[in-house]
Each structure stands twice: as C-alpha cells, then as structure tokens.
Amino acid sequence: MSKTGLSVLLVDDEPRILAVEESCLRTGGITDVVKCSEPHRVDSILAERAIGVMVLDLWMPEIGGKEILARIVETHPEIPVIVMTGDNAIESAVECMRAGAFDYLVKPPDPSRLLTVVRRALELRELRRDYAMLSERVQTEGLRHPEAFSDIVARSPIMWKVFQYVETVAPSGRPVLIMGETGTGKELIARALHTLSGRPGKFVAVNVGGVDDTVFSDTLFGHLRGAFTGAETHRAGLIEQAADGTLFLDEIGDLTESSQVKLLRLLESGEYYPLGSDMPRRSQARIVVATHRELGALQETGQFRRDLYFRLRTHQVRIPPLRERKQDLGVLVEHFLEKASVAMEKKKPSAPPEILTLLETYSFPGNVRELESLLFNAVSMHTSKKLSLEPVREHLQGESRVPRAMPEAGPLVSFSETLPTLDEACDLLIDEALRRAKGNQTIAAHLLGMSRTTLSKRMRRTEGGE
C-alpha cells in the first residue's frame, strides 16, 4: 500500500497500458493500486474506495477523460488527477491543467516519470488531508485520546496545544521533526506519535548523534554475511525491525553529510541498501526525527542538507522548555516525588509550600530531566515527613554560579541618563528579588546570594532611612 494509506486509481480503456502502469508503481513501492478499464465505473469506485490519486487517460471511446476530469474537479477536488495523452495531443493536456489537472504524462508513460509524478500527487493529497484535519481541530477543544500522553506530565495550555497537534498529524505517514532543548521529552512525544498512528509495527529508537557513516548504515540498514571482515552472519537493521512501525532518530542535527544523503534517499523512495547488497530493499516505516539544534540555521551554513531539511519539516513539533511552562511545576514535583519514593522504597515526603516559588525563580537549563534529578537527590536525603528545601537550594545556587553565555552586546539593565547610586541600585535589586520570590525573604536572599539575616538587616536599614 502507499505510505498515505490511499489507493491510486488507474483509468484507461487499454488493459495493456493499465498493466504497465501498475507494474511500474508496484516496483516503486506503491502497491495499493486499483485498475479501471470501464470509465463508467469511476463513480462507484470513488464511493467504495479511499482514492488518493487518479491517473486518467484522456481519449476513451465510452466516456471522454475531459468529462471525467470535470466531474472529479467538481465533486472530489481533493483528489489530484494526472492525465495521460498521446504525443499529438499536448494542447489538450495543457487545457486539462488549466481545468484543474495536477499534471500530465505522454503515452506510453516513462516508468521513472510516472512514479515521480504519482508520488508528488500522493504527497499533495496527504498535505491537503492534514490541513483539513488541522482546520477541524482548531475549532474543537480537548483530546480524543489523552491516554496516549499518559507518560508526559503536563497541564499547561502550551503543552496542551502540542498534544493537540501531535494527535492531528499522527495518522499521517509523512516524517515528523521534533525540536526542543535537551531534557524536554522529545522521545516521549515520538512514542505518543507512534501510539496514536495506529501503525502495527514496533517503535524503534536510536541516537544517531556523532556516529560515522559506516556505523549509521550498519545500524539502520543492516548488513549481509561477508559484507566486511567479521560479518559472519546476516544482521537486520533497525529500519527492518521498524517495518510498518516508527523509526525514531534522535539528535539528527549531528548526522554526517554522507549519512544525510542515505536518509534522504530513504525518505524520497522508501529504498535502502544493506551493507554488502546491490539490491535495494523497501521500507514502510514512518520516520520521526528529533534535535536540540536549529536545523534551519544549520542548512543555511551548509552543515545540513537543504533538501533533507525541507523533507523533514513537513510536520514540526516544537516542545517548549520548562522555563516557558512553569504552570507544570506543581504536577511535575508531585510526580517525581512519588516516582523517587517508589524507586527508593521510601514514604513519599510532602512538598513544602514555598518549593514552587523557589523553583519558579530558576531557568532550568536541563529542563524536566534536571528537575527529576534534583528531586530524586532531595528525596534520597530526606529523613522527615516534609521534604527539606536545603538540597534544592544548594542545587539552584550551585547552578546559578556556572558561567553562562552572555549576550554579544548591550547592557543587562537599561538606565536613564542619570545612573542610580549604589544604595539605590541595591534597593532595586532587593525589590526585584522580593517580587520574583513573591515576598518570601528566604528565597529572595537565595537569589541575591546572601543570607536571610543580611537581607533583613539591609531592609531594616532602608526602611529606617539609614
């Protein structure tokens, strides 16, 4: 079957031409083909089958191709129609293009050209279907299958929108590009995509960051016996293991140029070569990739192929960092306290009320993964019913001392022409720290890198006008 799950309908009154077209498409991996040598049956076939593309002969004695094209454009505008014509009827083909045909081919069709045009038409058909589904979801609320996201702890509106988009594009067979900083949960989103896709095959994940071309080829495509020294048996690659399922490639932004070429071929044709084989094999696995790098910037500098980038970006999922969805901190803290307690066979400690205020002051460069590590450490050290904030403060204070990349130019704070005095600047910092700490002096002192006693003295001096 085609990757879209839609059939290709071939309409021609010459059985020989139909056989040639079907053989060409099947050889190219498009096996869901319906042949029709009786043009009057087109309407009934459209009513019974999900047709993705129609290849239509213009000159048939019973019903003309132009008549069928006009009817399809009116009643099934979502179906791309490729018209077939003879060498002496190019002008008629051009007229059909103006009337709404997707493309035209000259009989007898060149196998490579036929396969290329049908593939492009199927891609257009699927994009139209995805757009229609997205438009429908914009007008609805909620998730149809929230259980698919049970491993992702979130309640913020920004993550809810991510879930809705993932649910919408999951049935598509096209590649998905997942972007997000380290620790945001890109693989969890990929697993949810696979679950929602309904694909019968397995979910297979591999990190391709930093691997050379030989390792990449052997890992993904496998090898035949004798392909190289030490290859004593046949090895099935991950793409074969993911047949009719999902292949998840993490850290795609670090892929070498030669490996990018092989991945592009797989995406374009569905074909790959195991090491040691000169015969291509076909795959129906859905490709999902992830990266913490900006592929758009990499392709501008030549580090990532432009054609591969545009192939991958059909469906894009951007996972926001934790600092942009701090509404999730509450449920995440409870989740990780429970998870850590079970793992360490301890009674779950209660979270002190001020822990969320303290965590909200932190940017979490390691995102959810860093929060999990922080809380596991805190649970490992706790000895009372209430979780101690000391390990949390120590982690946040230690990380805040790690040098960060500074902006290339420009001041960190904007001033008017008159600079504040040191005392005035100190008061402004204290006010800002208290605002971020929601009035909690202990947390404000932590942000300022001083003890609470020192902060209290400074505040009393300011209030006293000293």
Image: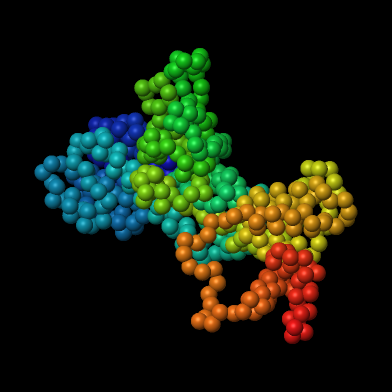
Horizontal relation, residue 96 to residue 237: left or right:
left
Q: How is the image coloured?
A: rainbow
Q: Residue at x 60, y 64 (%)?
A: 157
Residue 24 can be seen in this image: yes
Q: Residue furthest bottom?
A: 465
Q: Which residue is more in the foreground, 291 or 394?
A: 394
Indicate whether 453 appears above or below 45.
Answer: below
Image spot of residue 314 (x, y percent): 42, 51
Q: Residue at x 81, y 43 (%)?
A: 344
Q: Which residue is more in the foreground, 460 or 122?
A: 460
Indicate whether 427 appears above or below 149.
Answer: below
Q: Which residue is more in the foreground, 412 or 438?
A: 412
Residue 221 can be seen in this image: no
Image spot of residue 465 (x, y percent): 74, 85
Q: Which residue is more in the foreground, 15 or 182?
A: 182
Quarter of the image with the N terminus in it: top left
Quarter of the image with the C terminus in it: bottom right
Q: How many marks?
A: 0
Res 391 quadrant in image: bottom right
Q: Residue at x 18, y 43 (%)?
A: 85
Horizontal relation, residue 403 to residue 123: left or right:
right
Horizontal relation, residue 433 to residue 39: left or right:
right
Image spot of residue 419 (x, y percent): 56, 79
Q: Residue furthest right?
A: 384
Q: Residue at x 76, y 62 (%)?
A: 355
Q: Residue furthest left?
A: 88
Image spot of residue 116 (x, y percent): 29, 40
